[in-house]
Each structure stands twice: as structure tokens, then as C-alpha cells.
Amino acid sequence: MAGVRAPPGFTVFSASDVPPALQEGHRPYPASEVHLMSDFRFYAELNDFLPLPRRGRSFTHAVAPHESLKHAIESLGVPHTEVGLVLLDGVPVGLQHRPLGDGGRVAVYPAWQTLGPVPAVGLADVPPRRFIADAHLGRLARYLRFAGYDTLYRNDWPDAELAALARAEDRTVLTRDRDLLMHRDVVHGCYLRAIEPLEQLRELVARLRLDARAPRASRCLLCNTPLAPAAKEAVADRLLPRTLADFDEFWRCPDCERVYWRGLHWQRLRAALGKPAGGGA
């Protein structure tokens, strides 16, 4: 540039030397990559997933025009399985809704709260009462099996395999790992806040309105297969003399052949779940 001396180590360019992508008024990225600003507000227990400065208040978050509500909500740390209702500018919308629009106001409510007659448009249906528990929920899985609920469990499942099986068999994923609930194959899931297994069961019962006391037949605590009644003489060779003398009713797992009776262990489980004395095994 004429008349301008550059300091040592620097070069002076004229306006014509500036690349078009950096000139004023030029959009350096495709329109689809330009982010819009939306106001988000999460309610009740959904705030547990947010950093402290964003809890209990509205905040602005950048979203791409092609981004769905599900992606935007999960990018903020909230699994879609925990969402029961989303309002965009006061109107119920589904999680796959897009675009959000610049300046949109998004209100997100938890799965176990209702607002009267307002429908949860496009959100997941009521989670199925068939479960798959992650590696840290072995005791909860046993409680659910004892209560008669079909519950898969293995302590070495990779997340991808567990999520794929949940989708293939239409099962609700039970976990304390929110990243697992954000897996693309997870449709239904429950994030459990409680740490103690019985408290986890009570939390699940309250959220899904389960009846752990219903007189349904129990399942094998080891392999999840429904138990079948077994004649005393058919299992006598597998029992201790004291057990044979004290009990007359027995059940057997058709798969692993484990034998059950209403001994002290059964009584403790029954008391823990608060189940009535009658009913299945």
C-alpha cells in the first residue's frame, strides 16, 4: 500500500488483497452452519442435568437451523428419555421438530409431570414394562424379577450392545448413566437418581406406576425366565431334608433348573417389596 511502511516482520495488504471469505458482508460458512439463538428453560428435576448457572432460569443457547429439538436438548446434557413435554413459543411440539427459529422460547418439562390436558406431542409413548438394566443395577434387576417384571441384566454388556437389544426388543433402559440414555438406539429409558436398590425400585414404581405388590408369578432371579410350579417329589433330590420337611410348595426355572420355595430369603424379598402374601411364587 503506497505511503505506508510496514514494521519489521509484518506485511501491509490493500483491501483488494483480502480473501473474499474474510471481507465484510461475506458469509464464510454455508447457511446451514449459521447458528440461531433460542431461549431454553428446563423445569423440575430436569435441572439436575444442567450446570448450576443454568438451573431454574432461562438461558440462551445456539442451535443450527437443521438441528432437532432432541439434539439441542441432549447437547445441553438432558437425555431425551427424561423429557415428557416440550413447548416452543407456548405450543407443544415433538422432539424431532426443526427448525427452532431465531429467538424461539423452548420450555422443557420432565417425563413424570403433566400439565392437565396438554398433549405430549410427538414424544415417546409410555415406556414398556419390560426392562434392561445396565451393569450397576444387578440388585434392582433381581427385585424386578421377583416382582414378576421381565428384566434383562448382564454385568458386562457394552453400551452399544445393550442399547441395540433394548431397541430390538422394545425394552426400557434402566441406568444411572445419562450418556447411555442419549445413545441413538435408546427409545425408552429411565434415569435413576437413587443409589440404594430398594430406593431405585420405589423411584421406578412411582415414575412408571408399577405395582410391585401385584400377585403375578415371579421370574428366576438368575436368568429372568418365568417360574413354573414343581411337584415336591420332582425336586426332592435337590433339596436338604429340613427344606423338604418344612415346605410343600416349590417352583422351578425351566431354563436353569434352579428351585425356589417360600423360605427366609423369599420372605425377606416379599417384605422389602411390600407384596401381599397371596399370589405367585
Image (tube, rainbow, N blue to C red):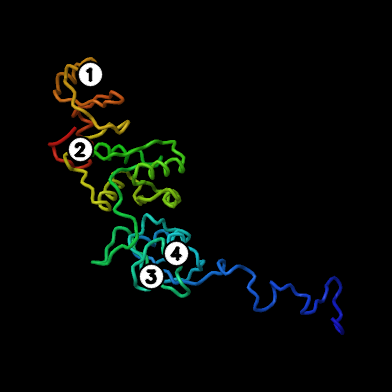
Q: Amino acid under label 4?
A: Leu
Q: CA distance from mark 3 to mark 2?
A: 46 Å
Which quadrant of the view contains residue 27?
Answer: bottom right
Which residue shows up at 19% across the image and 34% down it? 267
Mark 1 or 3: the one toward you: 3
Question: From the viewer's perspective, is 272 left or right of 174?
Answer: left
Q: CA distance from mark 3 to mark 4?
A: 23 Å
Q: Nearer the viewer, residue 251 or 228?
A: 228
Q: Which mark is residue 270?
A: 2
The alpha-carbon separation of the residues under discs 1 and 4 comes to: 57 Å
Residue ID for mark 1: 239
Seen in the picture, residue 251 relative to 183 is either above or below; the reply is above
Q: Identify which amino acid the numbered label 3 is placed on.
A: Leu
Residue lying at 26% horizontally and 27% vertically, measured from the top left: 253
Q: CA distance from mark 1 to mark 3?
A: 63 Å
Q: Secondary structure at mark 3?
A: strand
Q: Is 21 positioned to the left or the right of 226 in the image?
A: right
Q: Which residue is mark 4?
A: 52
Which residue in the rendered view is the most extreme toward the bottom? 3
Q: CA distance from mark 2 to mark 4?
A: 41 Å
Query: CB under 8 Å between callouts 3 and 4?
Result: no
Q: Earlier in the sequence, mark 1 or mark 4?
A: 4
Do callouts 1 and 4 mark residues in contact (Cβ within 8 Å)?
Answer: no
